[in-house]
Image: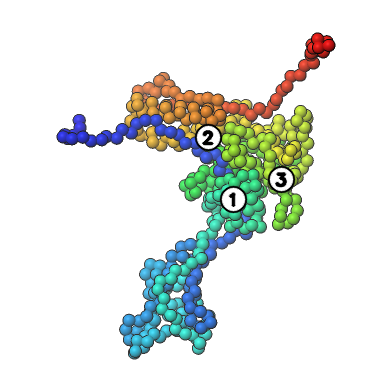
Amino acid sequence: MPEFLHGSEVIEVNDGVRSITTVKMSVIGIAVQSVFAASATKATLTLGSAAINDDLTFTAAAAGSAGNGINVSIALATEADQQLAVTVKDKAITITLGSDANKNPIGTVTEIVTAYDLVAEATALAAISTTAKEADADIPEPISKQFLSGGSDEPFPLNKPVLVLGNERYAEGLGVNSQAYKYVKQMMEQYGALVVVVRTATSADSAVQKGNIIEAIGKFKDAQSEVQYKPRILIAPGYSHDDGVGKALESAAEKLRGVTYLDMDVAATYTDAMKRRKSYGGRVEIMWPQDVVFDSDLNVNTPMPKSVSAAGLRARIDAQRGVHVSKSNKEIYNTVGTNQTVDWALSDKSCLANILNENRISTTIREGGFRHWGNRNCSIDPKWTFETTRRVADMINDSIELNHLWAVDEPGTTQYMQDVLGGVNAYLRQLKNEGIIPGGKCWLDKDLNTPDLMAQGIYYFDFDFGIYYPAEHLIFRSRLNNGYLEEVIANV
């Protein structure tokens, strides 16, 4: 019963259909190592001038942007015969000059350095130095609060996801001469993708390095909370030819509802690739051979793991056409060849490219440029053999799941059920109208939603959807028909 009110009021009704936003499927996750990665820098502040022997330089004790919050003041004494003093409050360092009997300031920069070094709270914040010799040192000028500056955090801290926006300049902190930077650059040549980079420690021991890369792959799961994006196209170029790394990528792809592209070693044969395929499932696509690109640092053509360009290409097709469109038969940019020969002819069933595809291995062909050639992942289930099927299903499932946080713990009324059904059906109609799926629907199975289950807080909503499969095999049926010769006589 409403409370008594002689008047009017508004009660907000919060039911109704909620729209569903499609999750972003084209974020790339890459695990790398780089000995050239930039380090954090320390903030500094220089007061005075070395030319007149009154300079003081403050350098933050710890590297990083936090040092930019440290500030320094130099104040005059307020009384006669006052001792030079250094005080600290939070991140504020105050140097109060001494004074003589006439309140004239005393305390040269060398004396300040000596007094400062005795104050542990000050040295814990920043170190102090001067270029002045004791005999020549002068008294500094008073200054109001001055902040240290130039401190920066490590751009790619170890084992922490970092978001690189759609330009390789945001990856320069990896070191422009590093292989890791070149991988990102090659992806950006395909498309200005969002890339989650996880850099791991470098080791000369190959077994340790392999473990480090696997640890970095495990950090992909933290990307959503760290950088607000979940990577769904996962690669570890330079290492994914190893099955330990490959299995870590496959596991991460399963958890993230993504896919992973595995490379073969630069010297691996096509039979090696076909044998390896049997070890993996429906979220893995194996690539053979490696691409060849021109390395402008070395001025030579050099192999490049194919997973790099494939990931960038997948992001490009997602953006330009949609997740339902295959990346096969699409041009790869900034590629000059393959490190092993791949023969191809459009109707030749025995050519190497076709044999590879038949065995679920993707490759590169040369026809009107260099093109990715292959639609299939490693799944032995015909229902899930095409990458586009897997990714469209992931997109729909994740989008529906993640957009229904509002529906959790709400009362299970008739209106509530209609709102959930209405939202999902509206979303499936939207995907149909956009040409992503041929159709889909959501319904309530009354046999599943029994009073007993509803009493336990469990509600079932069923939905289905169709898929547009890639036209991988075109068959044109040709006939010779002499009947058309009758027109020749008829026109005489």
Location of the C terminus by quadrant is top right
- For residue 395, the mark is 2
Q: Which badge, 3 or 2, is on the more N-terminal residue?
A: 3
Q: CA distance from mark 3 to mark 1?
A: 18 Å
Query: Three-letter amino acid code at disc 3?
Result: Thr
Location of the N terminus by quadrant is top left
Q: CA distance from mark 1 to mark 2?
A: 25 Å
User: Where is 201 relative to 456, above or below?
Assistant: below
Q: Which badge, 3 or 1, is on the more N-terminal residue?
A: 1
User: Where is 143 relative to 331, above or below?
Assistant: below
Which residue is denoted by mark 1 in the rendering? 167
User: Where is 173 relative to 239, above or below?
Assistant: below
Looking at the picture, tell me which residue is in the foreground, 97 or 434: 434
Task: Look at 41% across and 20% down and name the residue there.
Answer: 447
Q: Which badge, 1 or 2, is on the more N-terminal residue?
A: 1
Element assignment for label 2: helix
Query: Percent x, y for residue 457?
Result: 36, 30
Q: Please identify, in this view, whether the residue under mark 3 or under mark 2 is nearer the observer.
A: 3
Looking at the image, residue 55 sits to the left or right of residue 281; the answer is: left
Q: Given contact means CB atoms under 8 Å apart, are the residues at marks 3 and 1 in contact?
A: no
Whether residue 416 is visible here, answered yes or no, is yes
Element assignment for label 3: loop
Quarter of the rendering containing residue 18: top left
Whether residue 203 is visible here, answered yes or no, is no
Task: Look at 51% across and 47% down and name the residue there.
Answer: 223
